[in-house]
Each structure stands twice: as structure tokens, then as C-alpha cells.
Image (cartoon, rainbow, N blue to C red):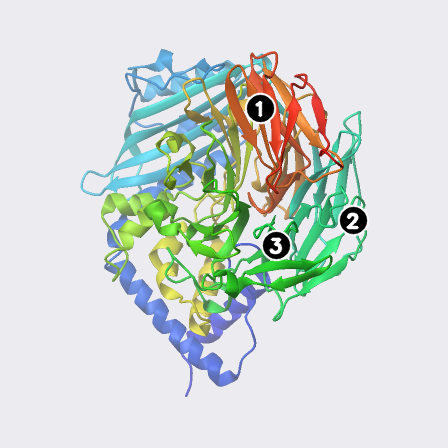
Amino acid sequence: MRLPDRLPVLAALLVGIAGYVGWRHSRSPGIPAPGSTDRREQAARAFLGTEAREAELDRTHWAPELHAERFEDALVAFWDSLNASGHAWDTFAAQVPDTLVFPAETAAPPDGFADLGAPQRGRRLDAAGIRSWIATLRDAGWQARRSRWELRAHDAGANRSLVRFEILATNPAATERAQIRGEARVTWSGPDSPRPRSVAIERLEAWGLAGPTRFSVEATLDLPMPPHTGFADPLLAIGRGDGTAEVIAVGADLRYHRDGAGRWSSRPLADLPPERLWAAAVADWDDDGQDDLILAGHDGVRVLRGPEFDGPGQPVWTAPRGLLHPQVIAVGDYDGDGRPDLWVGQYKLPYQGGQFPTPYHDANDGFPSYLLHREGPSVLRDATEESGLGARRRRVYAGSFVDIDGDGDLDLLTTSDFAGLDVFENDGHGHFRERTAGLGDARMAFGMAHVSGDFDGDGLTDVFMAGMGSTVAARLESLGLGEPGDADGRRWRAAMTSGNRVFAGTREGLRAAGWARGLADAGWAWAVTPLDLDNDGKLDFHVCNGHETRAGTRDYERQFWRHDLHVGRSTNDPAADLYFRAAAGRRAADRASYGGWQHGACFRRDATGDFRDVGWLLGTSVFADTRNAVAVDFDGDGRMDLALTAIEEWPVRRQSLVILRNTGGTAGHWIGFRFDGCSGLNATVRITAAGASQQRRPTAGESFRSQASGAVHFGIGGATAVESAGIAWPDGSRQDLGRPAVDRWTTIRRAGR
């Protein structure tokens, strides 16, 4: 039977797509597997049926959303013109609304920043007044460096939209920066060639900084990729005996070292076998006082002895069927026998082969993860089933051993895409019971990473889970549109797209923390890094974000929410595979982004306890998609620096290691501890200064494929001494550290070693 005439054209398109989209750590389709001619013909027919069905849904069910997208298209065209222009103010001036109204009140800035919004309160400008105001900004030397525009709600009857905006600006001559964010009601001329008629700003944050930023780029180092992989990570920071640290990019097979003059150099890591993907952790495997490098690849787990990590390493466990996507290694002695055990989590990419996580809010259709019990010096045994962990097959991004309930044994936390946070409680005898239900709907997320620690100073363990927000999901909520044929779809969608969230430790277990609402919005989040960036005694958080930034700001999210969620299922489907590839081809032709045009977030906790993203003003913003991050004091001055990986898809594809040095601003006193002759993994260091207690605990498997090893750091604000310091080792023993001097690093050596 002859196929439709348009199919050969489609086949040619798909061949082009296959060459364009490879096997990468993204939500893009991969390369198709070969199949017989009959199967391909059958798949092609099913694909055409799927295309027709989804087009009908656009015409009927999704019609209000497509109407809203006509207005979003105008906003996207404006955004693209700003990005393409070398003179952003001229672009603004050419497309002003008829009226612009500022709110009567503006948000007060955090401590240390200027309020730029106060002079604009209550102003109402016509088009001429807007152009005059823009000219004033331009003549004063201000330059708009980056902006973001999101149509988050729409009223079709009134041709009115809620638009969230962000403008980042600099004034080089005056050494000033401005960060302007808010929401505005935009009334449009109509759906045909819409233009903004009036803009009423309802919420405005306009904050500024005069003088140098706290962070500055010390180095941007290329991460050349070996031919067998596209992954530079995991990113590891490892303490050295001379009081400095080095950074290792495992996938790139490189280790970087900073000398005393701030110069960075690189050398090969190890003679590793070629792998598409490694999972990695740093821990003292053989109890010799040196950190070793533990790697999980396709064949299983191997250990490279420290401090040099000479490869290819010693195999300690062979995977029974091969690891298809080793993502994370958690390290901890979960059964108290004195030997570190491992948990190896795997991710499973959506779209590959036409499969898709199902259900998208609670998918349990990934590759298996493994709990590996340490049997001897170089032997690991699979204890997954006997421990009670075999039922979960999440698409895992992060996992760590943490004593959540304070009973002295290590529980297991995992964060997964298309599911969120899971909690497994250790009964003290090596068996785990799932306690996820107690978290409620708040645990559901496109979970990307988590970190644990005492974030609110009450002595209990809290958990920060990095998730995602969604402009399209917010707009669908405003339109009252649920998922086709899914009565609960709106409930799950709202939970899944509420961004980052914190679960506070309580005597009854982890519960959603109301005090952490300011941390929610960080776009498409990846690694999250806690650090006290100004040594005031309060932990701040840096979040990497951005997925695929390309030339256009139109985002693939529209396709994801209207169609992709419903086309694929858990198993491979050739017709769905063709459908996903066709959608990817259209995105490539449009040069559209997917979770792009983001620049990282840095949430600083102010004197009121609120978190504010002031990354641009602090100097931590990177105009690229960032994935991994570690906080390390590279230069030993007591200010925590950052190392990030950046991935650029456009205008050229490259990966780089960005070093952000913390040099500026007023900072409080501090105290730091480095581990020597012992491993600090899963040990808890506690200090008390000025009557306030803090604790830190190094872990493996948290954040997004990132680990900083060998040191803990505390800011203590105005305190000039510590009243006490001590450490609780993983075996339950405790060691008094006395009253070490402040503003310096102190070495911890385990008693009896």
C-alpha cells in the first residue's frame, strides 16, 4: 500500500532532525533505532494519526491558549528585537505603549542596595513621556544588558495579559548596576498584529548597586569534550594538603588547580576508559585518611585511590545488566558496620525511543538504582531488594544519605525528574521504609537536585529541593485549562511547577517550610549550592539554571504542555518517536529555545529572614545555561568563591568552567575547618558564636552532579570569638574542637589517628 505523498518529505525532514539532535543530557529526542520497512511504514501512519489528533486538540481544547499565544508572539518578537539590537534603548523607544503607569508602592531593597523605584512611584506617562524617560536613562550612561519577558496570564475578552519582566542594566561610567523586576497588566490593541496600548505596573522591584560587585569572574576555562561524550561533569572540588583546592571535571577528564597568584592550570585526570557518562563521588574508601574517587560507569563501580586518582582504577562492583545512565553516587554507612556503602541512582531521558515519563507527576518507569553494601575491602554486594528499595524506579537526578529523623542512622533522600522528592527511613538494621507521603503534594516536582542542612538554625535537618517554574503552565491555570481527559491534571500541574521549595525538619518529619517562599522562582533550576556569601551567619543559596538557549526566545514549553505530556507513554513507541522528532525539527527551524535565556540565581537572606535573588547585583550572573556548581574558598581569605559549569548551544556549542571569586563588600567574621588525615564525609561540625549555633555536614550525591569535599565554612557576623566547636563523626563518636581562632582555617585531625 502506498504511503501518502507528503511522507517522503517528512522522512527527509526526520533524517535532518536525527543529524541535528544527538544523545545529550536534555529533554530532546535522540537518534532513531533501525527497523524494518513494514514497521517504519506502520509507525509513519500512526504518526500521521497522532499529528491529526493533536492538531484537532489545538483547534478545540487548546483554542484559548493558542489565542493567548498570539499576544505572546508579539512579546517574543519584542524580546528578540532587544536581543538582536546593539542599541536596546532605541528598541524600547520604538515600541512604547500609549500609557505607562507605575505603582504607588515599590518593593524595598535588601540591605546594602539602593531603591531605584521610589522616584517613579505613582507616575503616569504618555508615549512622549516614556520616550523622554528612556532618553534620560540612555544619556545618563545606562545600558540594558539582558531582559526577560513572560506572558503568565491572559484575559481574551479584555485583550489583557499579565506580563512578568526583568531588565538587567549597567552604567559603566558610574560603576553601577540595576536589577528591575516586576509584573504589569498589558492591554493590547487586539489579536491581529497586537501592540501594547497601556501598561500598568502592579509590582516593581528596582534595586541598584554602586561600586564593584561582590563576585567577579576570575577565569573562564574551556572544557574540551572527548569524542565519546558530551558531559563535562560531574564537577568535584577537592581539598589539598597545602590549604588550597582543585576542581575536577570528570567527564572532560581534567583537573584544574589555582596557584597563589590566581592563575589556573589544567592537567589530565586519569587514564579512564571511554564512557558517555560517569557518576562520581569523593570519599575515603580505604580509611587511609585520603579522599578517593569513586566512579560509576556502564560496567559498574570502580575506585581510584587518592590523592592522585591514578586510573583506570580498581573495579569493586560489576553491574548485572550494565548501567545505562549512571547519574549520582551517595556514600554512607547505612548499617553501622563501619564501612561506607553506596547508592547508585540512574536517570532516564524522556523522548528517547518515543517513551515519556508516565504519569508525568509520579513516574516510576526509569532505570533501576542500586543500594550496594560494602562486604570487604574491595567488594560490593547488591542489597537493593532486601533493603526495601527495589520498588522505586525513578528517573533520578540526586540522592544522599542523611539522618533526617535524628535517630543516629542514615536515611536516604532522592530527587527525581517527573516525581520530586522521596524519603526512605532507615530502621537501623539496614531496611528502608518509604515516608514520602508525609510530604504531601509539595514533594511533586520536576525535581533537579536537593541539598540538606540546618537552614533555619533549629538544630534539625532541612531539605532544599530545586525544581522548575513554568510560564505556560501558569498561563494555562489563568485560562482554566486542564489536561485533556485528566480531571486531576490541574492539581498535579500546579504542584509540579511551583519551583524550588524547602522542607523544614520537625519532630514529626519533613514539612513544607513557609519561610522559604522567596526561594521558589529560579527558572529551569539545576545545581543548588548553600553558602554564606557575606559571612553574616545566615546561609544563602546559589542556583544554576537554563536548559537550551538558542537565538530565539520563543520556548518549546508550549509544545511540551499542550502535546508532549499526552503523546508518549512509559514504553518505546515508534510513532511517538517520529512525532517528537518532528516537533524537535520545527524547534530547530525556528531556532527556538527550551528553558533558555536565564542567568542563574543567587538568593541572599536579608536581615528580616527573607530570601531575595540579587545575583546580578552580586556579580554571580552568567549569561549562559549553567549546570553544576561548588562553593570553595579558593584563595583562603574566608570568603566563599564559586565554580560553575556553563553550556552554550548558540551561537557556538561549547562548555566552560567559570570561576567566580568573592572579593568585595563588607563581610563578617568567619571560621573554617579543613579535614586532614580523615574523611569529613557525613561528619557534623557544630559551632556556637554570639549565642547562635550552626552546623555543617559534607555529603556526596547532593546538588546536581556536584560535590565540594574536605572543608566546612561558617560566617559568624559581628562575633569575634566562638564559644564552642565540636564534631560528631559518622560512627557516633564526638570530639571537642575547643575554641579555635576566628578568621582563619583550622585543621581537624581525628582523635586517635
Q: Which amino acid does label 1 sit on?
A: Ile
Q: How crowded is mark 2: few (under 14 residues within 10 Å), some or many (20 or more)?
A: some
Taking the spot 73% from the left edge, 59% from the top edge, the residue there is 378
Please report whichever mark, 2 or 3, sits nearer to the chain's N-terminal start: 2
User: Disc 2 vs disc 3: Cβ atoms closer than 8 Å?
Assistant: no
User: Residue 325 in the image: x percent, y percent?
Assistant: 58, 60
Q: Quadrant of the N terminus?
A: bottom left
CB-based contact (under 8 Å), mark 1 and mark 3: no
Relative image position of residue 206 (x, y in whole percent): 41, 20
- The quadrant in which the C terminus is found is top right
Disc 3 residue type (three-letter): Leu
Question: Disc 2 designates what residue?
Answer: 309
Residue 455 falls left or right of residue 362: right
Q: Is mark 2 on a helix, strand or loop?
A: loop
Of the residues under marks 1 and 3, which one precedes in the sequence? Answer: 3
Q: Nearer the viewer, mark 1 or mark 3?
A: 1
Q: Look at 48% across and 40% down and name the residue there.
A: 406
CA gap, disc 2 to disc 1? 33 Å
SS for dot 1 = strand
> Where residue 342 is drawn, which disc sits there?
3
Q: Residue at x 57, y 53 (%)?
A: 335
Rounded to the nearest whole Å, what is the CA distance between mark 2 and mark 3? 19 Å
Secondary structure under the numbered disc 3 in the rendered image: strand
Of the pair 93 and 256, the residue shown nearer to us: 256
Q: Residue 620: image x %, image y %?
A: 57, 29
728 left or right of 159 in image = right
Mark 2 or 1: the one toward you? 1
Q: Would you say 355 lies left or right of 320 here?
A: left
Which tag is nearer the camera, tag 2 or tag 3?
Answer: 3
